[in-house]
Amino acid sequence: MESSSHLSQRNFMKAATLGGAALAAAPAWGRVLGANDRINVGLIGVGSRGSDHLDYLLQHRENKPDIEIVALCDVYQKRLNVAARKAPGAKTYVHHQEVLQRSDIDVVFIVTPDHWHAPITLAAMESGKDVYVEKPMTHTVEESKVVAHRAKELKRVVQVGVQALSWKRWHKIHDIIQSGMIGQVVAVQGTYSSNSPRGKRRVMDTAAGPEATGEEHIDWKQWLGPAPQIPFNADRFFHFRKYWDYSGGIATDLHYHIVAPFHVAVANDFPTRVAGMGGLWVYDDGREIPDTFLTAADYPSKYSMTIQSSQVNENGPMMMIRGTKATIHLSDEWEAPPSRKYDYADIFPESPFAEEFVKKYGNDQVRVEGVGGWYEDDIKHVDNFLDCVRSRQQPNCHADLGYKVSVTIDLSVRSYRNGKMYYFDAEHEQVVEKG
């Protein structure tokens, strides 16, 4: 059965309205920043990852005092109190709609569950703000299409939180591929795997909830937003990535981090067809999302992608980019065994081209240093976004890239859930279901 979160266009626009004022009436003010003006920042969502972003913003301000954190927002009062102690000058909010109504805020960071990404992003752009939104850019293909097109129409800067795209690694790999060194790319493969006995679960505060008072209070209705309206469920709130209504599980949480770099390295295309496989092989704690998952996709640039991940085994497929003349062997992008954490790429020729390779490069192996996934700071992605807010250039993970990656990710989830292959018509930007 199709996910209830795969909204119709009408329902999506209704959900988007929940993000802020009605879209048709939303004021698109937006300050024009002078060279010496500070960028006023609002942070929506200050949980685990949101706290990281607050730290990055504070670090940025220490290094370059050109921003001011003026608003913090979260539905859980305890998290809001902790964040407020770090940034005492910021005003606190429970409802992000109030943050978006402030005409003095230039940018917002959206670090909420996936189902809120598109509604808040759209409402923020309509109110004249630039947006840094954590991955995935949106919960569904349909949402991504609207967000990407609207970002272009409104000339807003949108950065999706795939921090590796602001590291040196993938831009270097892109240049190697463009040089013709490995020939035509025919396949790419990778993983983002870990062996987490607790399934990457965050600590649950059993005292918190909508009936609690003081700092334990959670505004559950606000948190649900466009999702199905159900009674409070602590597991869904604290572990939202276990449930389809709020997340795409491994695909949106982990595979997004691998698909996006391959789009940068090879080509930023819509996929032609996508399949998703896997299962709940270990966990039986009521979660809906699989603990082991595979995304497979074909692209019009004539190559295939496979990404296999698990939360119960840390050894996925070796990260490789396979060409007709040579293959690039890379260290794992993220969590991995220690033996697969290194700061270089090895390029080996294919047998028919070995002699040509040695003649051209002087060896039967070329090692490229400085392309590991473990040594550069996430703050680079935040800095890139803030630089682009001033320059009005496209950031490293812009909305069009986020859209095309979301198509692969969301269709892999649909394929897994519905047991079907999904196709995408790039000309009409439509999902095509066959069989």
Image (cartoon, rainbow, N blue to C red):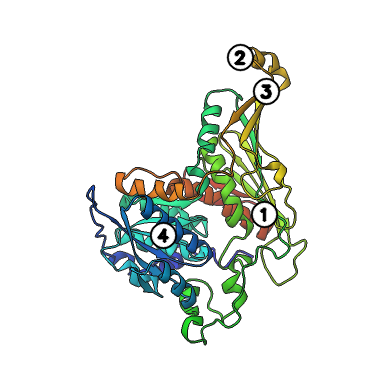
The amino acid beneath tag 2 is Lys
Of mark 2 and mark 3, the one earlier in the sequence is: 2
Give the image location of residue 277, x and y in percent.
70, 53
Label 1 crowding class (10 Å Cα cut-off): few <14, some 14-19, many 20+? some
Residue appearing at x 60%, y 73% in the figure: 236
**Which mark identifies residue 420?**
1
Label 2 crowding class (10 Å Cα cut-off): few <14, some 14-19, many 20+? few
**Which mark identifies residue 360?**
2
Residue appearing at x 23%, y 53% in the figure: 32
Of mark 1 and mark 4, the one earlier in the sequence is: 4
Q: Is residue 278 visible?
A: yes
Give the image location of residue 3, x and y in percent.
59, 65
Find residue 20 and report its image quarter: bottom left
What is the C-alpha distance between the residues marked 2 and 1? 46 Å
Q: Is residue 347 left or right of residue 54?
A: right
Asked if residue 135 is positioned above or below residue 364 in the image, the reply reads below
Find the residue positioned furthest to the front. Answer: 62
Of mark 4 and mark 3, the one earlier in the sequence is: 4
Of mark 1 and mark 3, the one earlier in the sequence is: 3
Of mark 2 and mark 1, the one earlier in the sequence is: 2
Q: Are marks 2 and 3 in contact (CB under 8 Å)?
A: no
Image depth: mark 1 or mark 3 in front: 3
The amino acid beneath tag 3 is Gln
Q: Are marks 4 and 3 in contact (CB under 8 Å)?
A: no
Secondary structure at badge 4 equals: strand
Residue on which the image places disc 4: 109
What is the C-alpha distance between the residues marked 2 and 3? 11 Å
Secondary structure at badge 3 equals: loop
Of mark 2 and mark 4, the one earlier in the sequence is: 4
What is the C-alpha distance between the residues marked 4 and 3? 43 Å
Asked if residue 178 is positioned above or below residue 22 in the image, the reply reads above
Secondary structure at badge 2 equals: helix
